[in-house]
């Protein structure tokens, strides 16, 4: 009897505070809408990252692949080292850097180097550790 009175009182208090209850469909809709809104808010950032990294060069078996790339001015090229040892991504030829290279970075196994090409021209890329590694990037503007 005391328990029944306590439950009845609690029901009255909860009804007064809550003002009503949401149906499961409404609660799920609100959660879904919030989730969709959050996904929409983060999607433009993900799309801009994809747009920035428009080209990828894979380093595997001590070779740049592809060996020739043509990109537009402002394109970011990602160099991914898939070998189990270090390389460099260096503007130059035969393992030697040019004066004032736009890129001269060490790249560890499974590492990535990002380079944005802002000026039109032809860029030779080499590895200072493996001079036979060569590639050409043509930037059109």
Image (cartoon, helix red, strand yellow):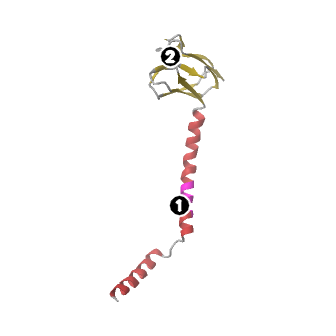
How far across and down, in percent of the image, does residue 55 sit?
60, 29
- Name the residue carrying label 2: 127
**Mark 1: few, some, or many residues within 10 Å (few <14, many ≥20)?**
few
Q: Which residues are magenta?
A: 29-36
| Relative vertical location of residue 82 with respect to residue 126 in this rendering, above or below | below
Tell me the residue at 59%/41% (across/down).
47
Distance Cα–Cα, label 1 vs label 2: 51 Å
Which quarter of the image is occupied by the C terminus? top right
Sequence order check, earlier mark of 1 and 2: 1
From the viewer's side, name the closer residue of 109 and 53: 109
**Mark 2: few, some, or many residues within 10 Å (few <14, many ≥20)?**
many
Q: Quadrant of residue 74?
A: top right
| Relative vertical location of residue 27 with respect to residue 46 in this rendering, above or below | below
Badges 1 and 2: C-beta atoms under 8 Å apart?
no
**Numbered label attached to residue 31:** 1
How far across and down, in percent of the image, does residue 21 sit?
50, 74
Which quarter of the image is occupied by the N terminus? bottom left
Q: Quadrant of residue 109?
A: top left
Q: Quadrant of residue 120?
A: top right
């Amino acid at each position: 009897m005391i328990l029944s009175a306590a439950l009845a009182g609690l029901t009255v208090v909860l009804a007064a505070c809550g003002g009503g209850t949401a149906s499961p469909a409404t609660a799920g809709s609100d959660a879904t809408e919030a989730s969709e809104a959050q996904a929409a808010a983060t999607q433009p950032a993900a799309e801009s990252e994809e747009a920035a990294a428009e080209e990828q060069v894979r380093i595997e078996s001590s070779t740049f692949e592809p060996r020739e790339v043509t990109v537009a001015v402002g394109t970011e090229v990602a160099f991914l080292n898939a070998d189990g040892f270090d390389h460099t991504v260096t503007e130059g030829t035969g393992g030697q850097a040019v004066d004032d290279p736009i890129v001269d970075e060490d790249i560890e196994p499974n590492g990535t180097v990002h380079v944005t090409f802002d000026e039109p021209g032809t860029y030779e890329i080499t590895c200072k550790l493996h001079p036979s590694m060569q590639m050409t990037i043509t930037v059109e503007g």
